[in-house]
Amino acid sequence: MEFSSKLLEKAVNEMAQLPGIGKRTALRLVLHLLKQPKEQTRFLTEAITTMREEVKFCRSCHNISDNDVCEICANTKRNQQIICIVEDIRDVMAIENTGQFRGIYHVLGGKISPIEGVGPSQLNINTLVEKVKSGSVSEIIFALSSTMEGDTTNFYIYKQIQECDIITSTIARGISVGDELEYADEVTLGRSILQRVPFEKFFKNN
Amino acid sequence: MEFSSKLLEKAVNEMAQLPGIGKRTALRLVLHLLKQPKEQTRFLTEAITTMREEVKFCRSCHNISDNDVCEICANTKRNQQIICIVEDIRDVMAIENTGQFRGIYHVLGGKISPIEGVGPSQLNINTLVEKVKSGSVSEIIFALSSTMEGDTTNFYIYKQIQECDIITSTIARGISVGDELEYADEVTLGRSILQRVPFEKFFKNN
């Protein structure tokens, strides 16, 4: 792609570093900013810069927070003994949106993935193990995605806390609500049948 | 969408102002920046800010340029008498990539669109008409998209320069190279037949 301006080219190249943004999309975004008042660009860059420089991570669960301890961990109405382990803060937001979970979270910041060079030491695993070993936890819920990396990470953590006297569970896998059975993959459908729940329980949850 | 941090929320909201970027995508982009070194965010915001503040538009063709006159207009090897009228600078880049045009451009900056509140006065039409009336132009090529807005804009400009002694042409419409005839729409296929070219000409261009 040939640019008529070096400034434009540089802005497009930087924008195209973002995931899922190719050069064409980057050009469209940058040209959009050019058509808008200068303030919009200033608001955007200031918001990103401030966020990047000043955002904090909760020292208990590693969720993004404006304070040292996030609102969820600081909420005394939540059950601090049940910890849901998730990959990143988007998962926290997704589970919070369901309104079904009243415990707290632990954000790992990724999954163990040798291919991408992510080992256990790069993830927030040690703080979790310490918390469990301190005896303040009664249940751990594994809520990582069910990929090979997710399963590996689950298993690695499980091994470390195996000897502690706590309940460990994993979120249910099965057919999505509203999905047709015939289009489900075999593994999911198989798990759906193996892990079937009493019909009365289904009634209560609905 | 509930955010655990006001700073994050603000950054996501600003990012989601960009066209085609929803809140989910914005969140993904912002979280990506958080995982990267702080420099990447600095490079990005600096590149965008500098571009927005310092970029110039060629005073002859209104293309984006680092100088007062863009490289294409300043190039004496190009035929300054043939002007290709395009909607925005992406079209300049697209035509330049073909390597088939050796004239200069005129970037309108949009199309006449009453629905979106864009009238002739918001577009770079006057400078074009002046240029044509000054007698320095021999041919005008209309290269706007063939939508109602594009046709309206073409016609508006044509009316203004009608009395000048110049050639006016419009880019050919027809079946795309490599496309199957059966999938083409009727209007395109119809134009393809009406505006057929001598077979020898086809040979020469390939």
Image: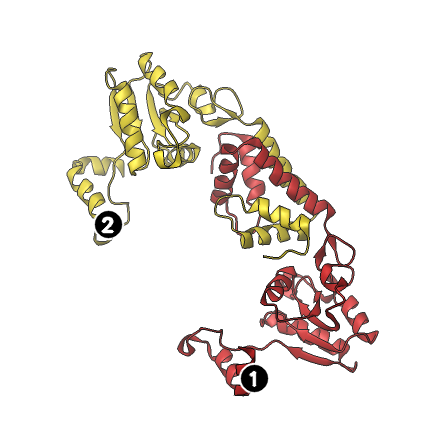
Chain colours: A red, B yellow
Looking at the image, which residue is at 31% across and 29% down? B153
Q: Residues within 10 Å of mark 2 (few under 14, many from 20)?
A: some
Amino acid carrying mark 1 in the image? Lys
Please report, as a chain letter, where disc 1 is located: A
Specify whether B179 is left or right of A3. Answer: left
State the SS at label 1: helix
- The residue indicated by pointer 2 is B184
For residue A39, above or below residue B21: above
Labels in figure, total: 2
Question: In front: B22, or B99?
Answer: B22
In this view of the protein, can residue B64 be seen by the observer? yes
Give the alpha-carbon distance from disc 1 to disc 2, as whole Å. 55 Å
Give percent across and percent down for residue B202: 22, 38
Amino acid carrying mark 2 in the image? Ala
The image quadrant that residue A60 belongs to is bottom right
Specify whether B186 is left or right of A100. Answer: left
Question: In front: A63, or B70?
Answer: A63
User: Of all residues shown, which one is farthest toward the right?
Assistant: A134
Proximity of marks 1 and 2: CB atoms separated by less than 8 Å: no
Give percent across and percent down for residue A119: 70, 65
The image quadrant that residue A204 belongs to is bottom right
Specify whether B194 is left or right of A171. Answer: left
Disc assigned to residue A49: none
State the SS at label 2: loop
Give percent across and percent down for residue A93: 62, 61
Name the front one of labels 1 and 2.
Answer: 1
Give percent across and percent down for residue B134: 33, 11
For residue A60, above or below residue A35: below
For residue B79, above or below residue A180: above
- The residue indicated by pointer 1 is A201
Specify whether B90 is left or right of B177. Answer: right
Looking at the image, which residue is at 63% across and 65% down? A96
